[in-house]
Amino acid sequence: MAGPKDLDPSSSPRAFLGAELRHAREAAGLSQEELGRPLFVSGSFIGQLEAGTRRMMHEYAVQIDAILGTKDFFERNCAALAKSKYPDHFAEAAEAEAVATAIRQYTQLLIPGLLQTRAYAEAVFRAYKPLATDVEIDEDVANRLDRARLLNSNPTTPLFWSVLDEAVLRRTVGGPAVMAEALRHVAALIREHRIIVQVLPFGAGAHASMEGSLKLMEFEDAPPLSFVEALDMGKLQDDPATVNQHTLLFNLLQAAALSPQDSLALIESVAHDYEHGEEHS
């Protein structure tokens, strides 16, 4: 396994704190496992903090200061990490997503956030928050579109591979015109070789992830993570057995889904139906 990567302290608060944690841990002569033991976390979790893929929570910062003799350094500096433009249940996953080398995602009902258009995202947020002000909705939409900059490079880094339930294509979010634009956008990203998408058709019947959506993330210098999300709830998983199980689930979804070529044809066909007002049930 490659040694830890030197982080640029100016790149983000997490990178700065991760670099300082690694320095302080090594100065104390502790391995990642030895530091993790009194915190009741794995050595891989400490590695993720050092690599900047996990956020340091206040309770860990206090204990780390006590163990490493760093006074209140980590407690004071982790406050910067607590500030996020994303909801609490999603903030840590969004931060990990930004440094991932590969993202694999299955969604049941919605186009993934990284692939949404402005109009589609606005319709989604307005449905979630019917009493929110236009300013609040605009801020939510801007934050979501900002995340999508991950896919602006070509070839794209990270690798993004999505399995979409057919319901994602059929549920009319924002009206036919919004759906047509949204699906054409997904198709364009596919044709530009920025993403890989498969559609899991209704005809596949029962499948491996009927209970919820799933996101898997891989990193250059840290173990993989999985993220499962429900209404106003989300959990980032780093337990190797759990991540392996979720990886198997995603592999089964890929096997049951249409090929990327057939999926693109279906996406463009449904977009055409929306554009021409045709039934697509």
Image: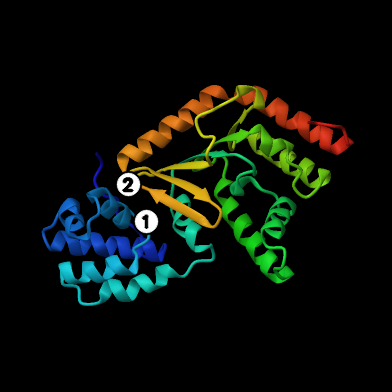
> In terms of sequence position, does the residue under pointer 1 or pointer 2 come before the other?
1
Q: Amino acid at mark 1?
A: Arg
Q: Is residue 234 visible?
A: yes
Residue 40, position as x, y percentages in the image: 22, 56
Residue 176, position as x, y percentages in the image: 82, 43
Q: Which residue is mark 2?
A: 222
Q: Residue furthest left?
A: 29
Closest to the observer, 55 or 166:
166
Q: Is residue 188 visible?
A: no
Asked if disc 1 and disc 2 are in contact, CB closer than 8 Å, the reply is yes
Residue at image point 29% right, 61% down: 19
Q: Residues within 10 Å of mark 1 (few under 14, many from 20)?
A: many
Q: Amino acid at mark 2?
A: Ala
Front of the two marks 1 and 2: 1
Q: Which residue is mark 1?
A: 54
Residue at image point 14% right, 63% down: 27
Distance in Å between CA atoms under marks 1 and 2 = 10 Å
Q: Residues within 10 Å of mark 2 (few under 14, many from 20)?
A: many
Residue 211, position as x, y percentages in the image: 52, 39
Residue at image point 87% right, 32% down: 278
Q: Along the horizontal axis of the image, is 238 left or right of 142?
A: left
Residue 206 to residue 145: above or below: above
What numbered label is drawn on residue 250?
none
Q: Secondary structure at mark 2?
A: loop
Residue at image point 34% right, 63% down: 56
Q: Secondary structure at mark 1?
A: loop
Q: Quadrant of residue 137?
A: bottom right
Residue 11 to residue 155: above or below: below
Residue 87 to residue 206: above or below: below
Q: Along the horizontal axis of the image, is 250 left or right of 62?
A: right
